[in-house]
Amino acid sequence: MIQQVIFYLFAALLIFSGVRVVASRNPVHSALFLVLAFVAAAPLWIMAGAEFLGLVLVFVYVGAVMTLFLFVVMMLNLDEVPRSKGFVRYLPFGLIIVGLIVTLMLNVIDPSHFSLHVNAGMIVPQHHSNTKELGLMLFTQYLLPFELAGALLIVAIISAIGLAFRGPRARKVQDPSAQIAVKRNERVRLVNMEAEKKS
Amino acid sequence: MQNRAGSSPAFGTNTLGENVLEQYFPILIFLLIGAALGIAPIVLAWIVSLKRPDAQKLAPYECGFKEFEDARLPFDVRFYLVAILFILFDLETAFFIPWSVVLRKIGSPGFWGMMIFLTLLVVGFVYEWKRGALEWE
Amino acid sequence: MLDPILQLLWIVIKILIIVLPLLGVVAYYTLAERKVIGFIQLRVGPNRVGFKGLFQPIADGLKLLTKELIFPTKSNKYLFVIAPVMAIAPSLAAWAVVPFSPHLVLSNVNAGLLYVLAMTSLGIYGVLFAGWASNSKYAIYGALRSAAQMVSYEIAMGFSLIGVLLAANSTNLSDIVMRQSGGIWHWYFIPLFPLFLVYWISAVAETNRAPFDVAEGESEIVAGFHVEYSGIMFGVFFLAEYANMLLLSILVATLFMGGWLSPFQGIPVLGALFSFVPGILWLFLKAGFFAFVYLWIRATFPRYRYDQIMRLGWKVLIPVTIVWLVVASFGVHFHIGPWFS
């Protein structure tokens, strides 16, 4: 019973914040509702048995990705966008994409999985670790996709630097270690000379 | 406070849903109580504190003059770069976690697979370093 | 119908048993900070309120509670109020999985370490919200500095936790402690010494404490992200910071110093002599030591420059963790040494 209550609570929160992401006119509000959407999705994933993914959703998407989004959106000081601009024009494309995604998801995830009980009803030992199960699959059966993900990540690193990095600037910096390492002989030259005498 | 052997009569077995509920329900309550402990003093202070606002008091802090532009200025792009690199490294961490707890079971392919992955990561990191993307002044 | 309500009540009571003493300790930790730093600098610290200043935190709290709450012009009121709550809720909720002794843990989550990681990564939101909602330049600079810094050190922190996972073979915090049993030489700070150092340095940086406190460097940007906060709203930020410090102290003790295990375990005479000491006391002693080190560091080191902080995070700590991760994983895979078997 309590599972249902929690499920519907977070599902409602997720749908509400999802709608607000699209409907908000202020980009900062949109980004904040996206954060809320991720936070609301995490308990649902955990309840569906994907404990590791639920926590990773919080610490990668909420802790990292949305931080970047907020950085950008907050500091660019974007103005509020008028609501209906281009709505009709982009509607068909939006609907086509939504349709494609829904078909794809229905193909991958059979509708018979659409229930809280499918995974939740599974009998598992008390110390069942979702993380270990995932690791066992990922690093044996799915090793190649994992390596491809690694290749994708390095491409992302390089392209991020290519896009956002404008090269080192002409900088005037001190090098403390060089300053400390200076020897007396490099700076001062001691000269022996005779004292001048009044002629 | 919670017996590690679990409260279910059949020792060691449970449905996944019960497991999750038993583990995460207290956490949910804890989060709510944590938030409440943040809100309560603010509400209390709102009730008991005096309220005598004036324009000068409410003005944002500045060095002795009235602010003449919005504080939310466009910012140095390097902060964004740090955030992007952080996301990528965070993802690598997410891959490392399941690997590190099953390393004893997955044998050589899994081990060397991760070493290749790690090499890719190090190559990216060295590239970053050599390009000077990690320099701050 | 009565049963679930009783269960809920029992959970709430258990949470309050953790949280209320925690808040008390946090309050007295602020006094301890002023006293310790005072003594290090040959002063006496606060000594007027109550016996030797023992009522100082209560007086501070009452003062903050009665001060006016100021909402700056053009600030975003909702976010301005939410920010301190966002700072304190995760730093308290992370305590849910801390194992105080073998059977004393609120929720023995299997992915406990991941949960802690997720909660600490949420701490950045309080800072970002506060900086943006205040609409003040100093607040925004402080928030950006602090966000970039926390983000950079979180990587090193995550990598050093992976070292612990490698050695312990479990994400459950109680299991990690149990894996270290058998004597002080089994504690992870020995085989994972570089990671232990990196974790502790990142812990200091993550909480924006001296010498990494450029986020609120008072000589540069006044008070950083909470410059516009007054009264108890500032107080909530303050509580969150100290709760976080205590959390990280207890985590270091749990992950690297054997948690509730006795340091005399496995030593012939001393082990039996000290076996009456409850595990929770050892844990608190260890955590207390690290909490003291926080203050010691603050009283000892001058503040880093921002570029030095970023250099230390990216160019020193991350390479060190990567190298030691490789060492540890080779140790585990090829069964080298007594610790990685």
Image (cartoon, coloured by chain):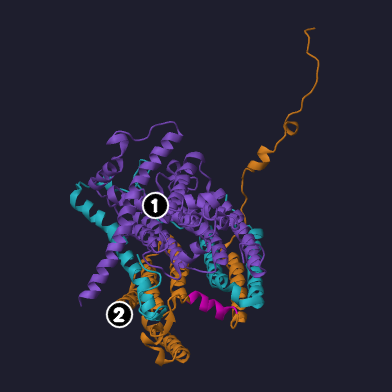
Percent of width and height locating residue B64: 35, 40
Main SS type for the magenta part?
Answer: helix
Q: In the displayed structure, would residue B5 be above or below residue A100?
A: above
Residue C241 bears which disc, if any?
A: 1
Could you say which chain is coloured cyan in the image?
Answer: B
SS of the residue at dot 2? helix
Membership of B54 in magenta stretch: no
Query: Residue A155 lies in what quarter of the image?
Result: bottom right
Alpha-carbon span between mark 1 and mark 2 = 34 Å
Position of the C terminus of chain A by quadrant = top right
Could you say which chain is coloured orange in the image?
Answer: A
User: What residue lies at 32% left-to-right and 53% top-to-bottom?
Assistant: C21
Query: Which is more toward the observer, C335 or C261?
Result: C261
Query: Which is more toward the observer, C95 or C82?
Result: C95
What is chain C's hue in the picture? purple
Residue A8 bears which disc, if any?
A: 2
Residue A81 appears in view: no
Which amino acid type corresponds to the residue marked 1 in the rendered image? Glu
User: What residue lies at 49% left-to-right and 52% top-to-bottom?
Assistant: C272
Percent of width and height locating residue B87: 52, 66
Q: Give the range drawn in magenta.
A: A130-139
Which amino acid type corresponds to the residue marked 2 in the rendered image? Tyr
Position of the N terminus of chain A by quadrant = bottom left
Percent of width and height locating residue C197: 56, 52
Query: Which is more toward the observer, C50 or A173?
Result: C50
SS of the residue at dot 1? helix
Q: Within 10 angstroms of label 1, few (less than 14), some, or many (20 or more) residues?
A: many
Q: In the displayed structure, would residue C42 be above or below residue B110?
A: above
